[in-house]
Amino acid sequence: MAKPKFAIYWAGSCGGCEIAFLDIREKILDVDRAVDLVFCPCVMDTKYQDVEAMSDKEIDVCLFNGVIRNEENLHIAELLRKKSKILVAYGSCASEGCIPGLANLTNKEAIFQYVYHDSPSVRNPEKIVPQTETKVKSGKLTLPAMFDYVRTLNQVVDVDYKMPGCPPVAEQIWAVIEAILSGNLPEKGSVIGINPKTVCDECPKTKEEKRVKAFIRPHMIKNIDPEKCLLEQGIICNGPATQAGCGALCPQVHLGCRGCYGPAEGISDMGGKLAGAIASIVDSDDPEEIEEIVGQIVDPVGTFYRFNLPSSILGRKI
Ligand code: SF4
Ligand code: SF4
Ligand code: SF4
């Protein structure tokens, strides 16, 4: 019997989601036995033309990671949608926008200005910037145009499932693969491979309903109580609003959760929810003191929307 056809693609991504796939270790051999990997630019010399030549829906499952940052990302997202029966937004970039999505705090013009002119490590006296078309002796060279802002996969094509995490943890990846191979997938549109709770629910630390007079950054901590909730010790932790599924990896090593699994079920705007959670533990009724305490949170947008700005209500800076 023919094996199901699998594809794994990276758009605007760091490649970590592909590496995470290998974290399933020897189970990768089970995957190899069970599926036919037909397209995966990270590990195989396959071309876009190979995908274009396929019949519509010929690929059974495509795991698509990365954001939609440029014309090439968009073209391949549309192509893989057409050629795949099941399209999964794999990882935080494709699902929520992730770290590349923080570029939505600025725009293409400002990014080009900094990267090609103003950055201290750049020397560009001729003010050269990448062009979408460049004439050379042998013809014309082209580069995909960058969009003004970053979009998630489901903001450009129809997506069957979302699988959050930066990157998703190995147990989650394997659970999703097993579900795919057994045909035991949930309803279309579901977030797969997660627990229907928050990181706080998976976290072994104790909460005592304590309020705080100050927020401390991790490198400033001298004495941390390993048994107690980080947030109640003044360390920002996004656990109260973050989707469970990683096993509270970061709090277990005394680092605040950064929120890479995206908003937990029922939370429409993660930053808003977190701002509310933080406000509720500030130990003061004096407006000036509250302002001073809250002012200790460096980069609130980058803290509360770190992994989900493009998919949040804010979306981007206009
Ligand atoms: S989700 Fe994280 S690990 Fe995956 S591609 Fe994006 S930045 Fe990299
Ligand atoms: S806020 Fe963070 S440290 Fe506290 S219980 Fe939740 S996940 Fe654990
Ligand atoms: S604890 Fe938070 S930041 Fe760390 S892996 Fe889990 S969801 Fe991601």
Image (cartoon, rainbow, N blue to C red):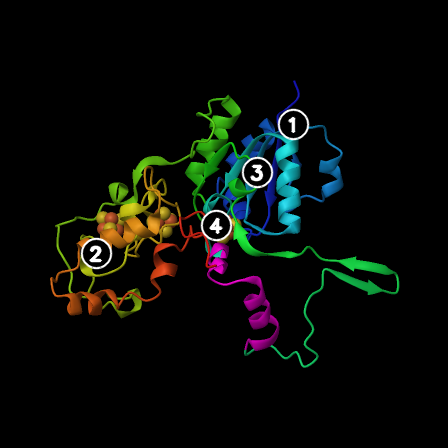
| Residue indicated by mark 2 | 279
Please report the residue visible at 34 percent of the width from the left and 55 percent of the height from the top: 304
Q: For mark 2, does the 10 Å Cα neighbourhood hold few (<14), some (14 to 19), or many (20 or more) residues?
A: some
Residues under numbered marks 3 and 1 in contact, where contact means CB atoms less than 8 Å apart: no
Disc 2 + disc 1, Cβ < 8 Å: no
Residue occupying image coordinates x 35% and y 47%:
269
Please say whether residue 84 is one of the residues in the magenta stretch: no
Residue with the mark numbered 3: 157
Ligand 1 is within 8 Å of the C-beta of the residue at disc 3: no
Lower position in the chain sequence, tag 2 or tag 1: 1
Mark 2 or mark 4, whichever is nearer to me: 2
The range drawn in magenta is 100-119
The CA distance from mark 4 to mark 3 is: 14 Å
Q: Which residue matches tag 1?
A: 57
Query: Which callout, 3 or 2, points at the residue further toward the start of the chain?
Result: 3
Asked if the residue under mark 1 is in contact with the one under mark 4, i.e. CB atoms within 8 Å, the reply is: no
Q: Position of residue 11 (x, y in %)?
A: 59, 48
Counting residues from the start of the chain, the first of labels 4 and 3 encountered is 4
User: Going from the N terminus, do you reach mark 4 or mark 1 first?
Assistant: 1
In this figure, which residue is indicated by the disc labeled 4?
97
Question: Is 312 on the left or on the right of 124, as rendered?
Answer: left
Asked whether the viewer can see residue 112, the reply is yes
Q: Secondary structure at mark 1?
A: loop
CA gap between label 3 and label 1 equals 15 Å
Q: Is 261 placed above or below 211 here? A: above
Question: Which residue is more in the foreground, 151 or 167?
Answer: 151
| Residue 196 versus residue 145 in the image, above or below | above
Real-space Cα distance between discs 4 and 1?
Answer: 26 Å
Q: Quadrant of residue 293?
A: bottom left
